[in-house]
Image: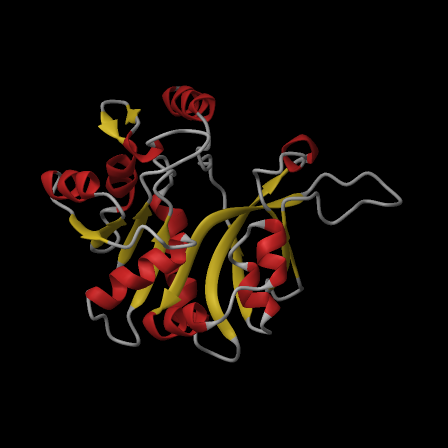
Amino acid sequence: MIIIPARIGSTRFPSKVLADVMGVPMVIRTAQAVRELDSITIATDSAEIVALAEEYGYRGILTSTEHRSGTDRIHEAARKLDLPADEVIINVQADEPFIEHEVVERVYRLTKERVGREKILAASAYKPIDNPEADDPNLVKVVTDENNIALYFSRAKIPYPRDHHFNRYQGHLGLYGYTMESLEHYCALPPSALEEIEKLEQLRILAHGYQIVMTEVETESFGIDTPEDLQRAIRKHLL
């Protein structure tokens, strides 16, 4: 099951998920990008988006306006769908209209193989990025151990290259894989101090001693935070 959380509000880009992307609303363009992989549900706090999802042939579920994160939103939707404990749930952000289905498939496979084993609550992905990209606080960085388990996520440039030039940072993709059981476990954890400081919900998992397994991918996609980001993404897609 792919669940796309689609919050109508956005401070930097009002009604972002409804923005036109080559003739189709952004949230629908995202759903179309991954429709071959699994069934899709759009979880939203907007009746307008529910109606839009149904107009395009997708299931829309109306969720609370009070959720702190997209993960909490997909959790409510998954409960309303009464998904079994072993169901694989992929959280695809609504602002990734050019996400490649191969990237989502990698996270899906990793979730089936690893999530729920040992202390792993989620699977995710990163892409190699260079120095200038790593300076952007909107592009989250992740450092991993030798087994591709996430050690930390930050908006800061990590690791810090103290003694030499370093040009291979890891840019985190806002893409997560859970089982229904691990999603329930995650959402039962209280918010953490690190999560509040960085405004990164995935830090809740690490702060409570659990793990996120990562995979490296090649992708041209990136999360769209501003109208300028959207125009840049469209230009890159058309090249």
The answer to which of 111 and 74 lies nearer the viewer is: 74
Which image quadrant: the C terminus?
top left
Picture residue at 68% right of the left edge, 34% below the top: 135
Q: Nearer the viewer, residue 110 or 175?
A: 175
Instruction: Write the residue at 46% across / 65% down.
Output: 122
- Examine the rendering and report whether any part of residue 142 can be seen: no
Query: Residue at position x 25%, y 68% from top?
Result: 79
The quarter of the displayed image where residue 100 is located: top left
Q: Position of residue 123 (x, y in %)?
A: 46, 62
Residue 146: % across, % down: 67, 64
Q: Position of residue 195 (x, y in %)?
A: 58, 57
- Residue at the extreme right: 163
Going by the image, does 57 lie left or right of 177? left
Q: Quadrant of the N terminus?
A: bottom left
Q: Disc count in the image? A: 0
Determine whether, in the image, residue 167 is placed left or right of residue 216. Answer: right
Residue shown at 47% from the left, 39% from the top: 219
Left or right of 71, for residue 142: right
Which image quarter: residue 211?
bottom right
- Which x, y percent locates residue 190? 50, 69
- Residue 95 image-quadrant placement: top left
> Farthest residue toward the bottom?
118
